[in-house]
Structures are given as structure tokens and as C-alpha cells.
Amino acid sequence: MLLRTTVERSDARAVLSKLGLTFFALLLMSLPKLQSQTVAMTVDDLPYVPGEWRPLGPNDGRSALQTNRKILHTFSRHHIPATGFMVEQHGEQLGAQTSRKILKQWIRPGFDLGNHFYSHADFDSISVELAEQEILRGESTIRPLLEGVSRAPRYMRFPYNHTGETQEKHDSMVAFLAAHGYQMAPCTIDNSDYEFNHTYTLALARHDTQTAEKVRADYIAYTAEEIDWYTKLDRQVFGRDVTHIMLLHDSPLNADTIEAVIGLFTQRGYRFVTLTEALRDHAYATPETYITKFGPMWGYRWARELNVKVNGRDEPDPPVWLDQYVKEAHTGAN
Ligand SMILES: [Zn+2]
């Protein structure tokens, strides 16, 4: 009896340990999959995006400081690196002191600053010479700040992702960037946050808290759809997961939702990396032969460059009510 019980116990132990091993093996098998998804976070239009497209002023100082503080605190809390892209002229409009205060937060460890043209000019509608001036004037504040901590600006993101509407313009600019120690910063996930933010800030200004809440909820739902859309798109092009680069803007909407946006990535098993690490993915070394006057995400460019047929028409659109709300507010209909 004693022997039997002992045998049973040891059998049970063997089964359990086998189960344990199986569980462990399954866990190990699932780990590389979980960790294979990586993303770099980038934030455009520093020092602040107010909502509608208008010049900034010193009165925006408080909101601008608050917005950047909230976004950066959340990134820090989750140990997420991020790169912010500065529009120098907007910093001048906000006021040099406030602007520098914001930018100093962006050069702390884990964060980086890039160039986003002096005046956010559209490269498609200006000459290469003017674009070169935009880049040089665009680093007036960020270069000395970065050099103060023994760094230099390394990344340049074209406003509207307009990378040159002719091969010649595109190539001249890439050469100019390389000669000045810059690399172009692509992006692979866009969630139309600009449009959501426009409606959001308008609703807040009108004390319409119900609409503001609806914008936040729809924004998160749409961001989830877009993360999944672009993940699928890039998988279709390369047959594997690429390291993503998320495009966000320095807006009150993102300040109020950044925790949830981060949550969407962590729920999907994404790990956060620096822009430098992201660009090591060979996908970003794909020769740039697709020239367009539009500013598509890189997945669409890669599809054209590598001759992979994808259907962009299936990409989800932001809800139409966002735009309607803005229009009706301007005509006094609501
Ligand atoms: Zn921009």
C-alpha cells in the first residue's frame, strides 16, 4: 500500500513535472513571438500643437508645458524612449524661454530631438535650396542644446512626410542630410491624431465634455485599428514583423491619452526601442525608388518599391463625425 502510494505519488510528480516542462516549453515558444514586435515612438511638431493650424503665442505657454510634461512623464514611467521633432519657428512664436524649457526635457536620457524644418514648410512646394535653409535654421535651438550634452541632431522628419516629388529633389536632399550628419526619419504607423486633436481641443474649449470623451474613446479605438492595419501591411510586404515607428503629435489629445496609446502596444506584446534601434531593421535600408508628392507611411512605399500588391483603400478612415463637429461648430449649428 505504502509502495503503491509512493509510486502513485512519484508518477503524479512525473506527470506534473512533464506538464510543467510542456508549459515552460510553450511559454518559451511564445516568447520570441511576443518579443518580435518592436516600435519606436516619435512625436512631431514640438514645442506644441494647439488644435487648429494657427500660429502659437506666449499665451499657449501653460498648455504647451503641461502637454509635454504629461507625455514625457508617461514615457518615463514606462521606460519608453522617444524622439521629438522640433519646428523652430513655432518655438519662437511660443517664446524662447518656454520653448527651451520644453526642449530641455526632451534631451534627458532616453529622449532625443530631431529637426522638422524651420517653418514646417512643404518640401513639395519649395526648392531644394530653400529646404536646406529650413533644415539649417531649424536647428538653431536644438543643436546647441544637444551639443551641451555632447550630442548632435541626427534625425530629420519631412513635414507632411513629403520627401520630394521628383527623384532629383529627393536624392539632393538625402545627400544634403548625410553631409550634415542627418538621417531621414521615416514612420510606419499613422493614426490621424491631428484630426482627432482638432475636434478634441475645440470640444474642450466649448466645455463640451461629452464630445471630448467621445473623441478620446474613438481615438483609442481607431489607433488600435491602425496599429493592426499597418502591422498587417508591413507583414504582407516583408513576410515578417518590421520594427515600427509610430507617428504622434505634441498635442493635448495625446497628453490625455498617451497611457492608453502605450497600452495598445503593450497589450499586443510590443517592446519599445529608440529610433536608432528601429532604423537598424533592414526594412529601412530598402532603396527609395518610389517617388510621390503625397506622404504615405513607409509600408505603402515599400510595397511599391518591392512590387507587392497591397490595397490601401481598405485602410480604416477616422470617423466622419470628427470633421462634421468642427464644421458645425464654425457655422454655429451646434
Ligand atoms: Zn509636422
Image (cartoon, helix red, strand yellow):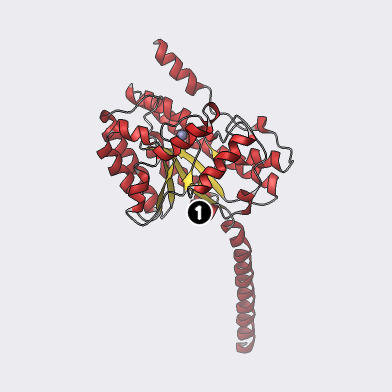
Residue 220 seen in the current view: yes
Q: Which residue is drawn at 44% across and 43% down?
A: 260
Which of the 4 image quarters holds residue 226? top right
Q: Which residue is drawn at 63% across and 78% down?
A: 14
Given the current orientation, which residue lies at the most extreme bottom position?
3
Q: Which residue is drawn at 64% across and 69% down?
A: 22
Residue 334 seen in the current view: no
Residue 49 on image: x %, y %: 38, 32
Query: Which one is in front, 181 or 297?
Result: 181
Which of the 4 image quarters holds residue 85? top left
Side (left or right) of 99 relative to 321: left
Query: Which one is in front, 287 or 49?
Result: 287
Taking 206 as reference, is 83 above or below it? below
Taking 89 as reference, is 155 above or below it? below
Residue 236 on image: x %, y %: 70, 44
Quadrant assignment for the C terminus: top left
Q: Residues within 10 Å of mark 1 (few under 14, many from 20)?
A: few
Which residue type does callout 1 highlight?
Thr
Given the current orientation, which residue lies at the most extreme front position?
129
Q: How many labels does the image show?
A: 1
Side (left or right) of 322 relative to 301: left
Quadrant assignment for the N terminus: bottom right
Side (left or right) of 49 relative to 156: left
Taking 230 as reference, is 21 above or below it? below
| Local secondary structure at mark 1 | helix
Residue 266 on image: x %, y %: 50, 51
Residue 317 on image: x %, y %: 58, 29
Query: Which one is in front, 296 or 322?
Result: 296
Pointer 1 residue:
276
Q: Which residue is drawn at 63% across and 53% down?
A: 282
User: Is the CB of the residue bearing disc 1 within 8 angstroms of ligand 1?
Assistant: no
